Image (cartoon, rainbow, N blue to C red):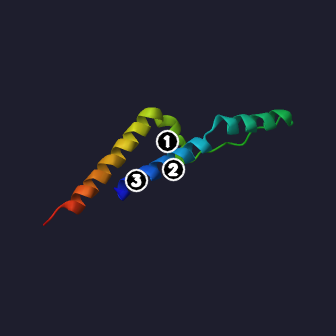
């Protein structure tokens, strides 16, 4: 049971980190500061793999991630309970 809680906590932490890193408020804040300054070409803004994954997969990707974590935890639990 502890491993299930640990895996779900890890999944929620990763999801939270992705949401915080891709929040619209952060984007609006950077646009507001650039609009107030002189017109300069913006440098290429790169995004991390986690940001890209969360933005492109959406709710379906979250469901698949939770399902995959559940199956891995179930397999580990069944393997640890198996008696040889």
Local SS, label 3? helix
Q: Quadrant of residue 2?
A: bottom left
Q: Residues within 10 Å of mark 1 (few under 14, many from 20)?
A: some
The quadrant of the picture occupied by the C terminus is bottom left
Inter-mark Cα distance, 1 to 3: 23 Å
Q: Earlier in the sequence, mark 3 or mark 2?
A: 3
Local SS, label 1? helix
State whether residue 29 is above or below residue 81: above
Q: Earlier in the sequence, mark 2 or mark 1?
A: 2
Which residue is most to the left?
A: 84
Local SS, label 2? helix
Q: Position of residue 36 (x, y in %)?
A: 85, 34
Q: Earlier in the sequence, mark 1 or mark 3?
A: 3
Inter-mark Cα distance, 2 to 1: 15 Å
Residue 41 numbered mark, or none: none
Inter-mark Cα distance, 3 to 2: 12 Å
Q: Quadrant of residue 82?
A: bottom left
- The answer to whether residue 22 is left or right of residue 40 is left
- The answer to whether residue 48 is left or right of residue 30 is left
Q: Residues within 10 Å of mark 2 (few under 14, many from 20)?
A: few
Foreground of the two, 6 or 55: 6
- The answer to whether residue 65 is left or right of residue 36 is left
Residue 53 numbered mark, or none: 1
Q: Are marks 1 and 3 in contact (CB under 8 Å)?
A: no
Residue visible at 39% across and 43% down? 66
Residue visible at 42% across and 49% down? 8
Residue 5 numbered mark, or none: 3
The quadrant of the picture occupied by the N terminus is bottom left
Report the label total: 3
| Mark 2, residue position | 13
Q: Position of residue 49 (x, y in %)?
A: 52, 47
Which residue is most to the bottom?
A: 84
């Amino acid at each position: 049971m502890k491993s299930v809680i640990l895996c779900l906590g890890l999944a929620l932490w990763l999801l939270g980190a992705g949401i915080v890193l891709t929040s619209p408020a952060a984007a609006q804040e950077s646009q507001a500061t650039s609009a107030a300054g002189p017109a300069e070409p913006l440098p290429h803004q790169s995004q991390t793999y986690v940001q890209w994954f969360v933005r492109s997969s959406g709710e379906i990707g979250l469901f698949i991630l939770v399902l995959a974590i559940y199956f891995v935890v179930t397999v580990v639990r069944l393997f640890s309970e198996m008696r040889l």
